[in-house]
Amino acid sequence: MRIKISTSATGEVYTELTDENPATAKAIWEGLPIEGRANTWGDEIYFSIPVEVGAENPKEVVEMGDLGYWPPGSAFCIFFGKTPASRGDEIRPASPVNVFGRVTGDPEVFKKVRSGERVTLKRA
């Protein structure tokens, strides 16, 4: 399963859902299409989505290009570099996230996205 993420700054970016956290991936897939407004936190974009899932194998440290779901804020997260919580070279969310997918291209294109920009998520 693939999700197409669209913004005016990046155009279309494709992602692959993984089977690492299948309940999270399924809930988000079933909730598509989704539109939100980007919030930025270091090299992370996040925004609330109308999907509620509890913690599912949450990770405190993620990889560049990971897609995460942040249960406390019902938020879709895209990680493309360090956050204010990072230590050293790690990529650390504000609190643990359910990793459910990965960007298939260069995740650093999301550095162009500014807070408030519209983000659209659709099945690809």
Image: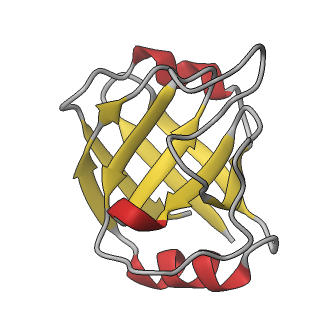
Provide residue 82's location: percent of width, then percent of height: 62, 20
Provide residue 24's location: percent of width, then percent of height: 60, 77
Quadrant of residue 86 within the rendered picture: top right
Q: Residue furthest left?
A: 116
Picture layout, residue 95 above or below residue 122: above
Quadrant of residue 78 within the rendered picture: top right
Q: Nearer the viewer, residue 88 or 103?
A: 88
Picture layout, residue 24 above or below residue 10: below
Which residue occupies 49% across, 75% down?
Answer: 28
Report the side of 56 relative to 84 (left or right): right
Picture layout, residue 85 above or below residue 59: above
Which residue occupies 52% across, 53% down?
Answer: 4
Which quadrant is home to the N terminus?
Answer: bottom right
Q: Nearer the viewer, residue 48 or 36?
A: 48
Which residue occupies 39% across, 58% down?
Answer: 75
Q: How is the image coloured?
A: secondary structure
Report the side of 75 relative to 98 (left or right): left
Which residue occupies 70% across, 26% down?
Answer: 106
Which quadrant is home to the C terminus?
Answer: bottom right
Provide residue 120's location: percent of width, then percent of height: 33, 51
Picture layout, residue 27 above or below residue 44: below
